[in-house]
């Protein structure tokens, strides 16, 4: 049975699942789909088109699905999609896509903390943690299980590889490769995200291989194409190594350097 406060505003064209909790003053607009078990805190705002996955928790004063912050916005038809079990804390903001028929996407099991901002057309993977007051510019991609700390601004169209941890405050102006720890000013790779890899069940042997391929990338001479060829030739191409190689090969912004 759902528990919906009488002072909330629920648009008649929204679609409501079962066992919802919607607090006083919450706004649920047209074309919003709330899957089963969602909790919407007091004074939270959700405008559509938006799909909120099962068991999501939206805390007070969070704002989801407002139009993209684009000066010359031509279309206001995009949407937001949030995966199951994701938590959106107080005053966080998530904007819908600037393109008709497309979505800003946040995966399942994410934790978006107080005041964090996810801009239009971002694609955030599963299990991502966005800490207080970090900000993702438009079209940013964040891989699964990454961690972006407070007061980090990721410039538009940058990519953060899976399993990376970013320690700020800082502005991110290049692509962050998978499984690394980023810190310092200037911002650079300072090691592997060993804790994150252990939590994923990645063995010490695989962690050593990741470190070895990054040693080729960061420390050895040659062009990027030569280094990638050597990485593929000298390392067992398990899922993690493939992730690193493919991410570097597909980078359009250049990647951060450093040491692991």
Image: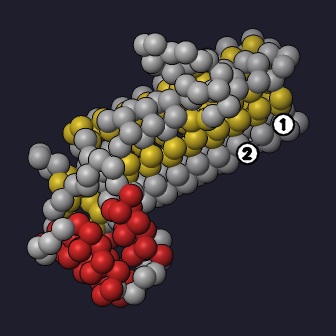
At mark 2, the secondary structure is loop
Mark 1–mark 2 CB contact (< 8 Å): yes
Question: Is 14 on the left-hand or right-hand side of 239?
Answer: right
- Which SS class for mark 1? loop
Nearer to us in this view, 211 or 87: 211
- State the image coordinates of residue 197 (x, y, percent, origin top left): 39, 71
Q: Residue at x 81, y 23 (%)?
A: 14
Q: Is residue 121 left or right of residue 189?
A: right
Q: Nearer the viewer, residue 207 or 219?
A: 219
- Residue 142's label in the rendered image is none
Picture disc at residue 54? 2
> Where the N terminus falls, by quadrant?
top right
Q: Position of residue 216 (x, y in %)?
A: 20, 76
Q: Dot 1: within a 10 Å radius of its alpha carbon, few (fewer than 14), some, or many (20 or more) residues?
A: some
Image: 25 above or below 171: above
Q: Is residue 91 visible?
A: yes
Q: Residues within 10 Å of mark 2 (few under 14, many from 20)?
A: many
Task: Name above or below for residue 192 compared with residue 232.
Answer: above
Which quarter of the figure has residue 38? top right
Q: In this view of the protein, which residue sits in the foreground, 32 or 20?
A: 32
State which quadrant residue 189 falls in: bottom left
User: Would residue 92 appear left or right of 6 to someone viewing this image?
Assistant: left
Q: Position of residue 136 (x, y in %)?
A: 40, 35
Give above or below for 103 relative to 227: above
Question: Where does label 1 land, which residue?
Answer: 17
Along the line of sight, the residue nearer the viewer: 86 or 232: 232
Q: Earlier in the sequence, mark 1 or mark 2?
A: 1
Residue at 30% in and 87% down:
234
Question: Which quadrant of the view contains residue 5?
Answer: top right
What is the quadrant of the C terminus in the image?
A: bottom left
Could you tell me if residue 96 is visible in this image? no
């Amino acid at each position: 049975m759902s528990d919906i406060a009488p002072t909330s505003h629920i648009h008649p064209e929204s679609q409501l699942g079962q066992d919802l909790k919607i607090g006083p003053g919450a706004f649920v607009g047209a074309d919003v789909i709330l899957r089963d078990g969602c909790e919407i805190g007091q004074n939270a705002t959700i405008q559509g088109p938006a799909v909120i996955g099962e068991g999501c928790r939206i805390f007070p004063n969070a704002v989801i699905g407002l139009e993209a912050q684009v000066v010359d916005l031509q279309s206001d038809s995009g949407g937001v999609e949030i995966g199951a079990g994701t938590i959106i804390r107080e005053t966080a903001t998530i904007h819908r896509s600037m393109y008709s028929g497309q979505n800003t996407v946040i995966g399942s099991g994410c934790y978006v903390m107080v005041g964090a901002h996810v801009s239009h057309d971002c694609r955030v993977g599963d299990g991502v943690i966005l800490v207080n007051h970090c900000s993702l510019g438009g079209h940013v991609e964040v891989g699964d299980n990454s961690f972006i700390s407070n007061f980090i601004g990721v410039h538009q169209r940058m990519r953060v590889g899976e399993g990376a941890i970013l320690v700020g405050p800082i502005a991110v102006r290049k692509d962050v490769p998978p499984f690394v720890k980023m810190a310092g000013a200037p911002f650079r790779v300072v090691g592997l995200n060993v804790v994150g890899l252990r939590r994923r069940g990645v063995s010490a042997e695989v962690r050593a291989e990741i470190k070895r391929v990054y040693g080729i990338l960061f420390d050895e001479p040659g062009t990027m194409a030569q280094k990638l060829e050597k990485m593929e030739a000298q390392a067992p191409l398990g899922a993690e190594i493939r992730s690193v190689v493919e991410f570097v090969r597909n980078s359009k912004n250049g990647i951060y350097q450093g040491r692991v």
